[in-house]
Image: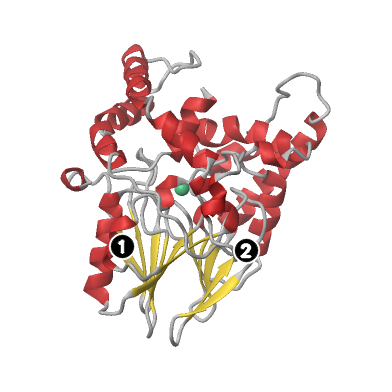
Amino acid sequence: MRRIIAALILAAAPTTALAEEGLFELTWREVAKGVFVGGREDSLRYPVVANTTIVVGKKGVLVFDGGGYAAQGEQVLAKIRAETKKPVTHLVISHWHGDHHRGAAPIIDAFPDANIIAHEFACAAMMDGPERRVEQGETELDGLYKEIEDAVAAGKWFDGSALSEAEKTYFARMVADYPGYKAQLARMKVMTPTIAPKETMTIDLGKRKATLLYAGLGNTAGDLALYLPKEKVLATGDIVVAPVPYGFGSYPKEWARVIRQLASMPAETIVPGHGAIMTDKSYLGRLAALLEDVAAQAEVGKASTDGSPKFAFDAHEGAFTGDDPVKARLFEMFFKEPIAPAALNEARGALSKNEPLDGEASALCPVD
Ligand SMILES: [Zn+2]
């Protein structure tokens, strides 16, 4: 089941005919002058769509997470062209998961001189085993979607639990959206970064500075956040995802520290990797508290000889899911199930088990 879920969440994909149905349709908001954020209004719908941030400077344009699906990358390109004649000079990839970069090729096709920037670990993961394993999982999606369709028909999820009417509706739409998703998967393209920093770096876009912040292990081992100091805009990538966080191969103890660090910055607008734009830091506090609790439980559980010691989430879950059964189901699939083994690896010091690299292909990444 975990394998299935990982294949689902990490997959990137979709497009034009379906954009009409809204599956990959972005809504744009100008959060500061010349800073535009595009995201799909319904952040829970599957496949998930990452938020894109466009920063227009005097010299050029920086795009943070240009799209997981070509249909998204095309809309981002159209938005840039509608707002400015300046070229895209920087495409920044927040982390290696495909929903943040595998659809950005239309932007690079239009601006082939643009730098493609990902943290050195993100670059390695894109070139190497992690990306390859996701693509392998995607070859099994037909069967998986058939199983989901059957589960909806039976009214029972894979673990035998009953599906509420709201969950049946959610998963039935997911199945209906599959052809459009698959069409986009066929268009996916992993581009090789041209700059792969190990640490925080600053980019001068002309009268506008952008900081690419690396604060350590978090949602992945190579998360970059974007901070615009003058505009006080912070785009977090999947370090922050709302309303339900993703916990695939993550490092909860360090991740909590990273979130506390981000929350200490003077940001007034916070753009999560997925979900609605935030204007206060309360969600970051809830998320850090959840992760600190998970890490503490992993400390206790790490010596357990039982292969999978139990984790309790009750103290926090309601703050993320309310009484919404769909959110509760997604919280279980996207967070509770994957975070427990990842937290145990972290507590045991076995960090490389969370996102294992094969090693050879990462040599394709530029040396900083
Ligand atoms: Zn994502």
| Disc marking residue 188 | none
Q: Residue at x 53, y 46 (%)?
A: 361
Label 2 element class:
helix
Q: Percent x, y for residue 17? A: 16, 44
Q: Residue at x 68, y 48 (%)?
A: 289
Q: Nearer the viewer, residue 292 or 216?
A: 216
Q: Percent x, y for residue 55? A: 40, 73
Circle 2 packing at 10 Å, graded few (<14), some (14-19), many (20+), is many
What amino acid is at disc 1? Ile
Above or below, 107 relative to 122: below
Where on the picture, by quarter, is residue 260?
bottom right
What amino acid is at disc 2? Leu
Side (left or right) of 362 relative to 76 = right
Where on the picture, by quarter, is residue 30?
bottom left
Residue identifier under label 2 = 262
Q: Nearer the viewer, residue 116 or 246?
A: 116
| Residue 330 visible, this orientation | no
Residue identifier under label 1 = 107
Camera-nearest label, 2 or 1: 1
First in residue order: circle 2 vs circle 1: 1
Q: Percent x, y for residue 316? A: 63, 40
Q: Percent x, y for residue 19? A: 21, 48
Side (left or right) of 55 relative to 125 = left
| Residue 130 visible, this orientation | yes
